[in-house]
Image (cartoon, grey):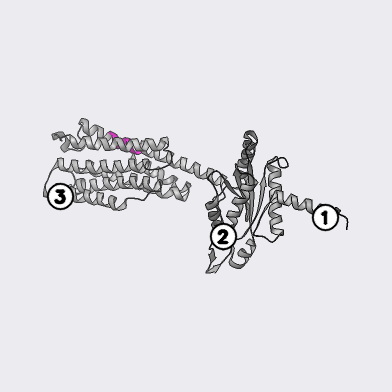
Amino acid sequence: MTMIIGLALAFTITGYPRFLQYPMRLWVRGLLIQPFSYALFSLRGQIPDWLSIIVANTLLSISFVHLILALYVYNRKPAKLPLMIAIVATTFIGESLLTYVWPSLYGRICLISILLALMCGLGVKAIYQRVEVITRPEHLVAIMFLVGGLIMLARMLKVPDVGMLSVVASTPMQGIVFTYAALLPVIATSGFLLMCGERLNKHLSRLATLDPLTGVFNRRTMTELAGKAVAASKRHGRALSLLIIDIDHFKRINDQFGHEAGDLALCRFVELVGEVMRESDVFARLGGEEFVVILPDSDERAAVEIAERIRQRLGDSDFSVSGWQVPLRVSIGVGTLGPAISDLETLLRMTDHAMYEAKRNGRNRVVPVSAMHSQSALDFGTRDSPQ
């Protein structure tokens, strides 16, 4: 059963993204090693003890190590590789000593039971040490390892009787152990596959909402979030402002250093802007080198202050390509909801005009929509005044 499940899972791995393939491969290896251990156990008395006892228990230990490592890798936690190697080495050395130096069936049972219980505990820890919300499939896998650990401890505490001299003898404890051995690959693997499925769904959802290069929201998601922010602002009578930021002379970076350098500049830009933003702000990429920041509960004055901090933070940054210092300068337009700007479409359009006004006035500056209106009114009055 374990061999069939392992082979079936190995056949489907290539259909998953690379970030899931490695933990799944570890899990498959664990499943495929177990049947060889069971086969050697079943041949006790017909093959040498070093095969049916030492190698069999060592293979079982290696199998569990792979399952636990798969959980650590899946949850992006540092794998306790030295500890896992120590467990396998302890299994091999301990079973060898208790078979040939100090022969003891109970000693061998206690040793492997303690080590398997320890690995089951590590499996539970690998799942529950996450900060994120634990899903039901993860609870399922954790329960299987928790039950396995308890069974191993109970097996250790039960003094073996004569019937346990044969690993296939029918005793209550043996029945529990082998029932668990049969259920583990079915239930735990089902739970692990569901875990991978949920991780895949989250990954696809992330790809649908985020810009793949910079990791900020994409244009479609920004439009949805901005629409909700505008509606909430009107409903609760709260201020709402918006920044449109364009990196100055970005084409020059691409032309001089290549598009890879341009990508690095965009990522560095996002990192620096993120240091200035508040948790409630929404950061999105409109396209190319143009970005949007939605500022809830911010009037024009507060928004201009944030925009100036962003501009200064970028100006003070040290970004270089191949040893050449590359300045990151930006032109920022600032728009705020109000009587003259009452919907998202107008807010985006007028803020975009303000950003282009900043570029026309020399770049590396912040221009609010109100200042642009004031300048337009001033120009109109100058044209109409008598000469």
Q: Nearer the viewer, mark 1 or mark 2?
A: 1
Residue assigned mark 1: 382
Which residue type does callout 1 highlight?
Thr
Q: Nearer the viewer, residue 333 or 117?
A: 333
> What label does residue 248 carry, if any?
none
Where does residue 296 sit, x and y in percent of width and height? 60, 42
Residue 48 appears in the picture as rendered:
no
What is the spatial separation of the Cα atoms under label 1 and label 2, in whole angstroms? 42 Å
For this view, does 317 lie left or right of residue 150? right
* Quadrant of residue 145 within the rendered picture: top left
> What label does residue 265 carry, if any?
2
* Quadrant of residue 332 within the rendered picture: bottom right
Q: Residue furthest bottom?
A: 323
Q: In the rendered structure, which segment of residues is drawn in magenta?
A: 179-186
Badge 1 density bin: few <14, some 14–19, many ≥20, Cα 10 Å: few
Q: Nearer the viewer, mark 3 or mark 2?
A: 2
Where does residue 153 sit, x and y in percent of width and height? 23, 37
Where does residue 149 sit, x and y in percent of width and height? 27, 38
Q: Nearer the viewer, mark 1 or mark 3?
A: 1
Magenta includes 183?
Answer: yes
